[in-house]
Image (cartoon, rainbow, N blue to C red):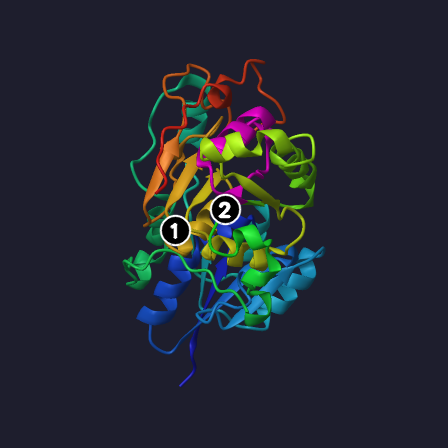
Amino acid sequence: MRKQKILVIRFSSIGDIVLTTPVVRALATQLENTEVHYCTKKQYASLVEHNPYIHKVHLLDKNLNDLVSQLKEENFDHIIDLHRNLRTRLIKLRLGIKSTSFDKLNREKWLMVNFQIDRLPNRHIVDRYMNTVKPLGVKTDALGLDYFIPDKDEVEMDWLPESHRKGYVAYAIGAQHNTKKLPLDRMIELCDKINKPIVLLGGPEDADTGEKIVDFFQRTDISAPYEEKLLELNKKAEIFNACGKFNLNQSASLVRQASHVFTHDTGLMHIAAAFKKQIFSIWGNTIPMFGMYPYRTKFTVFEVQGLKCRPCSKIGHSQCPKGHFKCMKNIVFDFYLP
């Protein structure tokens, strides 16, 4: 008997792809005699190629025609379009099979961004993703997000400084847009408040910021006379800058082994949720109401509510459009770590 083949499409980005994993798992575990295939951009292959619920991964490199030709050979029965853009429309049109598409709520987000008119549903984006598979008789389970790290990318504790080998807090300092990141002085303030060994996570583009944070807390010959006083004040913040030093799966391994995770609204936040970490999520120009807060894990939100200019974008900007950046500068860090 021929197996049913279902294609799930989500081209980008890190967090959005991780948020599709409950859909993939539900399809694979609830439908009998079914293969689940996944289509994404080549640069995001590592996010899905180790997922045991995915039978085969199809990658968009540069040529959409090549991808379509590859997909036609599979004779899919159904497409689950979780991206819904021009390219996915072309794929669905050219394959000519049944499909279900994700509602991106662009109109509702536009109203919220431009007029602060709230027409957004009080539902997490994962639950909205799951609407696309309801016609197939698939239901949401209670298992949360998935993230699978290959053995070769598991980070050993002895790869870290000795100060971090007995435990650390992870802080993901990166984000796709500057208005989703704390300014440097507030990052330093947060690290001081955490007051534990901290691993900074991010890409190569975040390495310079990480080094500036390290420099602030660096103990040198000049600071030696103050060391005893710092110990009296119980100052324990020791910073290891891992930004750009590890690939994504290795960074995920560091997240998995952390005691707590602090993060901006970025992909590592959702990877942390997949590992059921306790998350402290920091929100600037974007808002949790868009439905992308940590899923099925314990979390605390840091944000400035009541700003008339927030949200100023559904994605982000290179700099604050108003120039004051109050959404990040005025955040109060109210938390306690045992």
> Which residue lies at the image location 45% right of the left edge and 26% below the top edge?
110
**Residue 143 image position (x, y, % from top left):** 31, 60
Query: Horizontally, is 120 left or right of 243 in the view?
Result: left
User: Considering only order in the chain, which callout, 2 or 1, is on the residue closer to the N terminus?
Assistant: 2
Compared to residue 35, the image places residue 117 above or below, namely above
Tell me if residue 83 can be seen: no
Pointer 1 residue: 277
Which numbered tag is attached to residue 170?
2
Query: Horizontally, is 232 left or right of 226 in the view?
Result: left
Local packing at callout 2 (Cα closer than 10 Å; few below 14, some 14-19, many 20+) is: many
**Residue 89 image position (x, y, % from top left):** 54, 50
Q: Residue 186 versus residue 74: which sits nearer the camera? A: 186
Q: Quadrant of residue 301?
A: top left
State how far apart marks 1 and 2 are (Cα): 10 Å
Q: Residue furthest bottom?
A: 1
Q: Amino acid at mark 1?
A: Lys
Q: Secondary structure at mark 1?
A: loop
**Residue 8 image position (x, y, % from top left):** 48, 60
**Residue 283 highlighted magenta (yes or no):** no
Q: Amino acid at mark 2?
A: Ala
> Which residue lies at the image location 28% right of the left edge and 60% below the top edge?
141
Q: Residue 175 versus residue 15: which sits nearer the camera? A: 175
> Which residue lies at the image location 39% right of the left edge and 43% below the top edge?
279
Residue interval drawn in magenta: 170-198
Local packing at callout 1 (Cα closer than 10 Å; few below 14, some 14-19, many 20+) is: many
In front: label 1 or label 2: 2
